[in-house]
Image (cartoon, grey):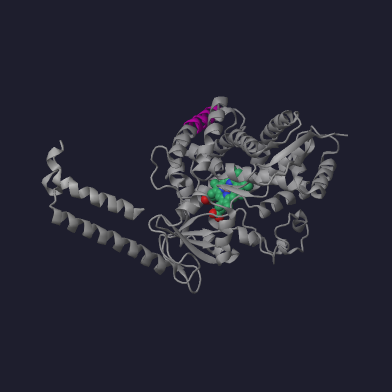
Amino acid sequence: MAFNLLYRSASASVPANTAAPSYAFNAPSFLKLSRGESATWLYTTGAVVISLLVLEQIVYRTRKRHLPGARWTIPIIGKFADSLNPTLENYKKQWDAGALSVVSVFHIFIVMASSNEYSRKILNSPGYAEPCLVHSAKQVLRPDNWVFLTGKSHVEYRRGLNLLFTRRALGMYLPIQESIARKHLTKWLEVAKDGGSQPIMMTARELNMETSLRVFCGNHLPNEAAQEINDKYWLITQALELVNFPLALPGTKVYKAIQARKRAMYWLELAAHNSKIAMAQGSEPECMLDEWITILNGEGYKGRRDFNDTEMAMVILSFLFASQDAMSSGLIYGFQHLSDSPDIMKKVHEEQDRVRQGNWDAPLTLDMLDEMPYLSAVVKESMRVKPPVTMVPYLAKKPFPLSDTYTAPAGSMVIPSFFNSLHDPEIYPEPEQFQPERWLNPESTANQNPKNYLVFGSGPHKCIGIEYATMNMVLVLATATAMMTWEHDITPESYEVDIIATLFPKDGCRLKFTPREQS
Ligand code: HEM
């Protein structure tokens, strides 16, 4: 292809010289070449291009050294085509090729780590590597978002944000989550009245988005804002490919995601502003923003107190960004795994009967959720079998000695991948099987090796929302179990995996809901 282009421009250049008088546009003298000069220019350009292509291969091979990976990289774009249509099968091939393997996309040299040891080494070596999220994340989230802080400034910023996930705060969020879950599940039951199955891919995403927006911003966000953010957020999800087209030109996914982010930021800044006014007027805290402002104004608080509306909005945006796709994936597979395992579903129902004691409409409390160890194990196991986040890109700040024999070059992407660690048969016998019981036996190999459970990462950037995310999934499934039963409408694509930032069943998980007979 590149050669074709070269050839066509070469032949076009010959008549250009002879036909020059007929052009209205007079080229500057330095662009007017004689036939001989034109050929020299052509050969020189050709030689430079070929040298660059050869150099590209030499650089790739020098960086790759003995690690598994393609022997030669496709000129310029590398494996860009694969990254446009990522499949779990292709990733698995890469992970199985070795504990460390390489790939190159658009000159970004990528070292994939697939073992628990190497993945944790990357996540826990802030001196060598820092998160770079996916390539488009800085454009989408803005480069000044707190999630891109590293080292001491990251630790300090994050210390303040940890206070938004205390048990006290989670207790405040719980009723919001439950009422939104009930509202959406009621809608699912309405749709189910026609007797057919429905894919929950998009409806579960909507449930999660409304939950997040109301937990984070309460009623400081007008309904139209929640609707607009929900409608446009999909554009952000679609831009989260491992490597995007490098320029955010109009029409590209990254461009569209940036426009969506601008609208979301407009509304989130407004919510931060409204929350500050409400708290200054002495209102009771009702959401995460209120909780944050109350903490900042608290007497005992020792951290930084002044956060402007934009900074607060960027934090909320980072939480939305980090949670929306992962939570949706986790929830959808939670529903799918349960419906595929009637014995396990039965035990979940029994646990709900025990905890709720016939009072199906009574609001849930944190104490009640604590009494649902079986459902918690279901959620944990579901995310082990299908980890929502399979890998987190990091960037090597300097040469990073990953093993005795391999050092990742400075500037390369180093990607800890969690799938193999979560499917290690030594730790999780029959790793493809959905077996919540493995988490209930304190002696099991799963419980002996908690460091293998990399679903939420590890080290200084480990997920800040673990308790909140887990609580939300337990809560939604507990509420669903109280309200209905569901059957999986299995299609040829039910067990195929789509990677759209996170993992989803290719058919969107079609379920048939029936109201629960509450005796
Ligand atoms: C099932 C749900 C979720 C999963 C599987 C998940 C997974 C992850 C993973 C793998 C990381 C990277 C960790 C690392 O680099 O070591 C991460 C980071 C993060 N997550 Fe989550 N997450 C989930 C939900 C949430 C929620 C609900 C929030 C916020 C409300 C959240 C906020 C964050 C933030 C802010 C970071 C970056 C932390 C930092 O850089 O310090 N996540 N998450």
Based on the displayed image, in which of its 4 quarters is residue 289 positioned?
Answer: top right
Task: Report the magenta stretch's main SS.
Answer: helix
Q: Is residue 375 left or right of residue 495?
A: right
Taking depth in this image into account, of 233 and 271 the one nearest to the observer is 233
Q: Where is residue 250 in the image (x, y as percent from the top left)?
A: 39, 37
Classify 208 as above or below 80.
above
From where the camera sits, is residue 122 visible? yes
Q: Residue furthest bottom?
A: 404
Quarter in which the C terminus is drawn: top right
Q: Position of residue 130 (x, y in %)?
A: 47, 56
Span highlighted in magenta in the image? 266-278
Total labels: the figure holds: 0
Residue ID at (18%, 58%): 40
Determine if the magenta segment contains residue 277: yes
From where the camera sits, is residue 364 visible? no
Taking depth in this image into account, of 342 and 442 the one nearest to the observer is 342
Q: Where is residue 324 in the image (x, y as percent from the top left)?
A: 58, 41
Classify 232 as above or below 466.
above
Determine if the magenta segment contains residue 489: no
Q: Is residue 128 left or right of residue 504?
A: left
Q: Which residue lies furthest to the right in this view?
A: 519
